[in-house]
Amino acid sequence: MALLEIDHLSIHFGNVRAVQDVSFQVEEGIVYSVIGPNGAGKTTLFNLITGVYLPSSGKIRLNGQEIQGQSPYQLAHMGMARTFQNLQVWMNMTALENVMVGAHRHLDTSLLKAIFRLPSLRRSDQALRQQAAELMRFVGLNNYVESDANSMPYGALKRLEIARALAMGPKLLFLDEPAAGLNPKETQQIAELIRSIASMGITVVLVEHDMKLIMDLSDRILVLDYGKRLAEGCGAEIRRNPDVIAAYLGGLARTE
Amino acid sequence: MDKKSTIGLIILAITLFIVPFIAPNSYYMDIAIRMAINGVIVLSLNLLMGYAGQISLGHAGFVGIGAYASAILPTHFGWNPLLSLVVGAVLTGLLALLVARPILRLKGHYLAMATLGLGIIIEYVIRNESGLTGGPDGMSVPPINVLGVDLVRDTQWYWIVAVVLFLNVWGALNLINSPFGRALRGLHGSEIASQVVGINVPRCKTRVFVVSAMVASIMGSLLANYSGFVTPDLTNFNHAIELITMVVVGGMASVFGSVVGAVLLTIVPQLLASFEGWETVIFGLILICFMIFLPRGVVPTLAARLRLGS
């Protein structure tokens, strides 16, 4: 059984069919990528799977259990984590605190313990702080452990979101354009980071535009076009697929 | 707790300790007591507004429920004043719990309107149930009695509210640096990010709303018992705005800012009383200047400047 099964998933906003009848499966432990031209419905598909949007029809299964209609917060407790294409960092906190809140589902949020700062909470908070700092070092944010989030550059914030998602201890990690806006060197570093996340046994689902990154990292690739599934397969299959070539080159030819 | 907070707590403790020795007469003691009570109310509102990012224009209503519980229950039903304070807080908590889900789904201006409506309803009920509340004229509150001693002297009251203020500041500092407190701040920063890391956003908002309302109610009870008289003005729109102004002037999302805001806006109208008729105008000008020169509130702006200077 696949970790994640998407079964004839559709959503429409009024007359716009943003995702139409898309099906695919993500096996545990792989890097699965979703690509396609702008407006193909990649982020919408992410938002459907992670519970931000409610599908118009179709099913989503995690470990065989149907999860469509569950809220993002319930899905988080099932081990689903994600980052955002347009950053959603808590700018009113320090970088370290951002990562600490990432572990929320494992924490004791008792109000009385918090107000009186009982010794048990003091100890667990201290341990949490250390774990968060370790995660920041893992994603390469060694220099920002003491920083406020709002003083960090864009590339660092992208990593911070990944550290926060890892703090959740996820089984399944959705990365929405982790390399967008990064220079080639930073992109290379993000690729290495994603590879080491995958080697920890976390299943990664990736939306990206950077073809080199996709081809280097992905075990399987899904190509969307106009909200529909155009092709699915490993990197070599996708590269040879005439429909994919037509969608990409054809699109290019039309704009020129 | 970090070093800055510890230093702040020590300064607060020293200040609270020396005030009764330097206050020249009971007029100043009265102002000091009102500052401390306002300080705690503003702190509770700041938790909701500054930290969790949920505006409430109905907070004066919660203060009013506490105040009137402490006035009505002992006067009409002969209840113990301390028990009345607790019952008032529980009733306020239940009301907050009841309205939290539908109201806190709203955002920004819509949330402001809904909480304003709540405040207006509370004021309307208090103003019109004159059989119980004395209507627009208000009613007197019997003195609170602790261990056989009637609390009537201002020094007694000062030490009570000083300890209450100190404990609330300490508890608030602890709270915001706890898993729950950080989740609250997350709501303000990005609600969608909060959801995807597994924060139950409606529940989190409800909890802070209820806690905030109950603290406001308890302080309303203390205020009623201290002043010996309550009027519906305690619950009106002006008072709600005054509390919000204290939060903003002192500093959103600043525990010590809440205290400073309450102190400043309690004392300034008193200092301006000699301007006969012009005090409101001058008060308004002072507020405008605060917002121009200390836009993030007194404490956060000055703290940021100190950090740059050092």
Image (cartoon, helix red, strand yellow):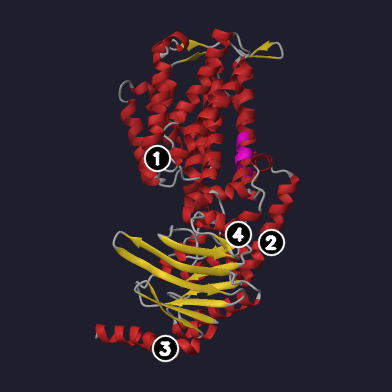
Q: Chain of mark 2?
A: A
| Residue type, numbered disc 1 | Leu
Q: Chain of mark 3?
A: A
In front: mark 3 or mark 2? 3
Q: Chain of mark 4?
A: A
Q: Label 1, label 2: how many angstroms apart (C-alpha)? A: 38 Å
Q: Which mark is residue A130?
A: 2
Does mark 2 fall on the same chain as mark 3?
yes
In front: mark 1 or mark 4? 4
Q: Chain of mark 1?
A: B
Q: Which mark is residue B7?
A: none
Q: State the residue in front, B11 or B184.
A: B184
In front: mark 1 or mark 2? 1
Q: Residues within 10 Å of mark 4 (few under 14, many from 20)?
A: some
Residue at the (42%, 13%) spot, across then down: B129
- Mark before the other along the chain sequence, 4 or 2: 4
In front: mark 4 or mark 2? 4
Residue located beneath label 4 in the image: A78
Q: Label 1, label 3: how many angstroms apart (C-alpha)? A: 52 Å
Residue at the (30%, 83%) spot, across then down: A251
Residue located beneath label 1 in the image: B111
- Magenta region: B168-174
Residue B34, placed above or below residue A166:
above
Q: Is residue B310 left or right of residue B246?
A: right
Residue located beneath label 3 in the image: A241
Residue A126, placed above or below residue B22:
below
Circles 3 and 2, Cβ within 8 Å, touching? The answer is no
Residue A212, placed above or below residue A48:
below
Residue at the (56%, 31%) spot, across then down: B215
Does mark 3 fall on the same chain as mark 1?
no
